Image: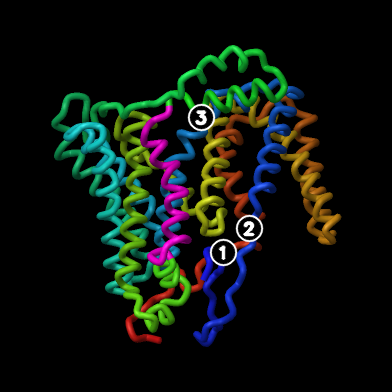
Amino acid sequence: MTADTVLASTPGGMPAAPVKARRLSTPVILLLVAAGLLAFSAVRVITGADDITSSGAVRAALASAVPIGLAGLGGLWSERAGVVNIGLEGMMILGTWGGAWGALTFGAWGGIIAGAVAGALGGLLHAVATVTFNVDHIVSGVAITILAFGLARFLSSLTFANMAGGGDTQSPNVPDLPRISLPGVSALDGVESKHWFLVSDMAGILRGLLTDVSVLTLIAIALVPLTFYLLWRTSFGLRLRSCGENPQAAETLGVNVYRYKYYGVVVSGALAGLGGAFLSMVASSIYREGQTAGRGYIGLATMIFGNWRPGGLAAGAVLFGYTDALQLRRGSESVHALLLLIAVILLAVGVWQIVRGTRIAGLVSIALAAPVAVWYFTTDQIPVEFVQAVPYVTTLVVLALASQRLRPPAADGQPYRRGGG
């Protein structure tokens, strides 16, 4: 069975014909990226909102996208094994505390390991509850999040409160992780400051991506193709995914379903813990209570947006990270400029849908483009309250538009008992 084949079964449990997953080809993806760059550059020139492609905005977007992407990868591992992991938020909380404590105790690299281990312990607890004792997945996940919040406060009172600069709700400053810059890229500063069409935009993007990058960011980026390889190109991954599609059929083929579900959920917790460690070690260099701010849930949303695949998940994390970065950097001006881009995209999508024969959907897209365009041309800035909500609104809109094409694992969240088939 190939990597592009989706395991499926009929309602009665009998194997069905494999379903071919539809994916964009590499040339199409490259064309879409090129079109996106041209569109952003054109909007920047027309509106004068230079920050939408600046190196600072790109760097901030990357920093915001990494913890969300790691949480989403964690959800992917768990749900591909058939276990819904609403507890990603709690595992990230454990990771924020573990990362700070590990860094203060063993150094920066010890913080990375401690954050991953703390999250993995949360994943192990979720696996014991859902896989071994068959507790409802949602109930277990919510309970772990509540437990993690209280446990982090308790552990902070035992450790950080006794350190200079620490307290019950925060840690002292943690050691910095190494940062890497590609030689020669910083020289593009002069090109970026010229604000030339496309050339300056490319210079800003390259500077944001290739200078002053934390090693944990590089690790997080590498985990995306590694996850794809392990889950879609190895026999281990095929067995794990079969547990999320049809565990009874996998059992008849000799797969230890319990073991593979444990693998998926524990790895899920470790990845979420890494995301938490990023927040306390890279994004802020200090642990603070409430630091995750719902990013575990947003990571779950990016996983759904990505249709339970690493590439789409990464794109969703970048989308949220970018909108989050804009509201932190001259948000009103930048978000107002993006209204023009959104209107053009909706119009183009509507025309494309009409050409394809889906006339009603095309007319809906065009109808949505009209008020967005009116909003842009009749205002000079966006209210601050809306700017702060842009990342969350973007996530909801994208999920709503993508919902009809989603295909979760067939047995995701369903109870399993050995011999039940």
Q: CA distance from mark 2 to mark 1?
A: 9 Å
Identity of the amino acid at label 3?
A: Leu
Q: Quadrant of residue 268?
A: bottom left
Residue shown at the point (57%, 54%) measured from the top left? 305
Q: Is residue 351 above or below residue 197?
A: below
Residue 97 visible in image: no
Tell me: residue 389, above or below residue 226: above
Residue for point 33% across, 54% down? 269
Helix, strand, or loop for circle 2? loop
Mark closer to the chain start, 2 or 3: 2
Q: Which mark is residue 4?
A: 1
| Residue 250 picture quarter | bottom left
Q: Is residue 383 visible to us here? A: yes
Amino acid at the residue labelled 1: Asp
Q: CA distance from mark 2 to mark 3?
A: 26 Å
Q: Which circle marks residue 23 in the picture?
A: 2
Q: Amino acid at mark 2?
A: Arg
Magenta-colored span: 213-237
| Residue 367, label in figure | none
Residue bearing the label numbered 3 = 209
> In the image, 71: left or right of 170?
right
Residue 410 x/y as whole percent:
51, 72
